[in-house]
Image (tube, rainbow, N blue to C red):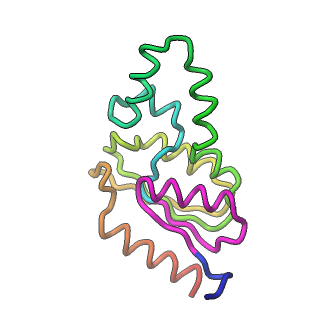
């Protein structure tokens, strides 16, 4: 295995994990995160009633006054925090009708990303993103980046 050619990729939770790895390791060659989950978590809890973010809302409904503490802890796992540290070239994708990973939360990670980046919008898709087209787009991106 050539360590200079290691890429991380995934969708949804896997996309969030790809951002985490890229933010924690500086030897990642490329990143593909489609419809990444757990990005801009606090915002997600305010704009969507979709689960699993709504679990945080359910908790805070009965644990009033704990919002700041809860969100302070969740920031440790937030894709935005990892994106700020990531420098490998990245390809993101976002479903503009996604209630699970709302577009503005994906853009929170994208806009924070420290490295070279591009994003593909799937105008009429939800959490499915671009489906097979995301996979094909990732392959083309990796081919451009790593030959």
Quarter of the image that includes the C terminus: bottom right
Q: Quadrant of residue 100?
A: top left
Among all residues in the image, which is located at the extreme left?
124
- Residue at 30% x, 48% y: name it: 126
Q: Is residue 145 left or right of residue 45?
A: right
Percent position of residue 65, x then y = 55, 11
As rendered, which of 138 and 12 lies closer to the eye?
Answer: 12
Percent position of residue 101, x then y = 40, 44
Query: Up-down: is 60 above or below 127?
Result: above
Q: Is residue 4 left or right of residue 44?
A: right
Instruction: Please tell me how many numbered marks the rendered image carries.
Output: 0
Residues rendered magenta in the picture: 7-33
Q: Is residue 40 left or right of residue 57?
A: right
Percent position of residue 69, x then y = 62, 23
Query: Up-down: is 10 above or below 57?
Result: below
Among all residues in the image, which is located at the extreme top?
64
- Residue at 41% x, 72% y: name it: 137
Q: Quadrant of residue 103?
A: top left
Confirm whether the magenta stretch covers residue 95.
no
- Residue at 64% x, 29% y: name it: 72
- Residue at 61% x, 37% y: name it: 75
As rendered, which of 72 and 128 lies closer to the eye?
Answer: 72
Query: Up-down: is 19 above or below 72?
Result: below
Confirm whether the magenta stretch covers residue 13.
yes
Q: Quadrant of residue 28?
A: bottom right
Query: Up-down: is 111 above or below 146?
Result: above
Q: Is residue 8 left or right of residue 133?
A: right
Quarter of the image that includes the N terminus: bottom right
């Amino acid at each position: 295995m050539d360590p200079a050619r290691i890429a991380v990729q995934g969708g949804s939770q896997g996309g969030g994990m790809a951002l985490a790895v890229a933010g924690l390791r500086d030897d990642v060659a490329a990143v593909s995160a489609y419809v990444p989950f757990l990005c801009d978590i606090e915002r997600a809890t305010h704009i969507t009633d979709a689960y699993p973010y709504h679990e945080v809302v359910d908790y805070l409904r009965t644990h009033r006054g704990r919002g700041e503490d809860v969100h302070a802890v969740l920031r440790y796992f937030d894709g935005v925090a990892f994106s700020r540290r990531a420098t490998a070239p990245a390809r993101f994708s976002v479903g503009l009708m996604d209630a699970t990973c709302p577009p503005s939360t994906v853009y929170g990670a994208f806009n924070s990303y420290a490295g070279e980046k591009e994003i593909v919008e799937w105008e009429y898709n939800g959490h499915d993103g671009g489906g097979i087209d995301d996979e094909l787009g990732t392959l083309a991106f990796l081919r451009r980046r790593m030959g």
